[in-house]
């Protein structure tokens, strides 16, 4: 069975450590699993029910919904902005939560991980993202977590894929998502 995992990165910055963590996930995916980093969150307008009209949804939001429809699971990468979830990630969750009753997250395992400069690695933002996805209809795998503290120092000269400890932890996260999707009764 092939498992497709859609990654959403809550930072738009070119040198984002969360983006690098997502790139590492792509490289570390086990055989039979594919992690795809969604490109284009910056182009999605803020959610507004007035522009969420069937047949006339903004193109960037429609692409996100189409990608979500094709995926088996989600892996969200969240930095922490002022103690909470970045607007770009919350906006993606809002678009995927609609139309009401037909959430793009519905029935799909979702894991939230990330890295941040602070000593806790962005856990507040990640907790907020889990809460939002759960309300949006996702199946949040609460027991699968990875928060990497001190990102600015830790990844100053090392890409996350080259950090043995982080690579091992991220590999375990992906393996557990893969196991949940490919054999949900065994997890």
Image (spheres, rainbow, N blue to C red):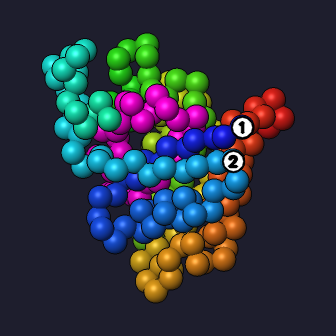
Q: Which residues are magenta?
A: 64-92
Q: Check disc 2 and report the residue beneath it.
A: 32
CA neighbours of label 2 inside 10 A, class few (<14), some (14 to 19), many (20+)? few
Q: Nearer the viewer, residue 134 or 34?
A: 34
**Kind of element beneath mark 2:** loop
Circles 1, 2 touching at the beta carbon (< 8 Å) = yes
Q: Is residue 94 above or below residue 142?
A: above
Question: What quarter of the picture does the N terminus occupy?
Answer: top right
Query: What residue sits 54% from the left and 65% below the top?
Result: 24
Whether residue 165 appears in magenta in the rendering, the answer is no
Q: Please determine whether, in this image, residue 9 is positioned above or below residue 128.
A: below
82 over 127 or under it: above or below? below
For the residues labelled 1 and 2, the Cα–Cα distance comes to 6 Å
Give the side of residue 90 with respect to residue 129, left or right.
left
Query: Mark 1 = which residue?
Result: 1
Q: Residue at x 30, y 68 (%)?
A: 14
Image location (x, y in percent) of residue 170? 63, 61
Which mark sits nearer the N-terminus, 1 or 2?
Answer: 1
Q: Is residue 180 left or right of residue 151?
A: right
């Amino acid at each position: 069975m092939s498992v497709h995992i859609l990654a959403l990165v809550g930072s738009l910055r070119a040198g984002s450590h969360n983006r690098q963590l997502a790139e590492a996930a792509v490289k570390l995916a086990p055989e039979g699993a594919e992690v795809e980093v969604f490109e284009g969150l910056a182009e999605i307008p803020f959610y507004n029910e007035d522009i969420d009209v069937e047949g006339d949804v903004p193109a960037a939001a429609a692409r996100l919904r189409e990608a979500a429809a094709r995926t088996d699971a989600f892996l969200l990468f969240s930095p922490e902005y002022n103690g909470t979830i970045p607007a770009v990630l919350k906006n993606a969750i809002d678009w995927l939560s609609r139309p009401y009753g037909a959430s793009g997250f519905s029935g799909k395992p979702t894991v939230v991980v990330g890295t941040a400069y602070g000593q806790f690695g962005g856990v507040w933002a990640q907790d907020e993202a889990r809460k939002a996805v759960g309300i949006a209809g996702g199946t949040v795998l609460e027991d699968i977590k990875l928060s990497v503290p001190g990102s600015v120092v830790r990844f100053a000269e090392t890409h996350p894929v080259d950090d043995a400890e982080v690579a091992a932890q991220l590999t375990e996260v992906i393996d557990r998502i893969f196991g949940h999707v490919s054999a949900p009764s065994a997890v």
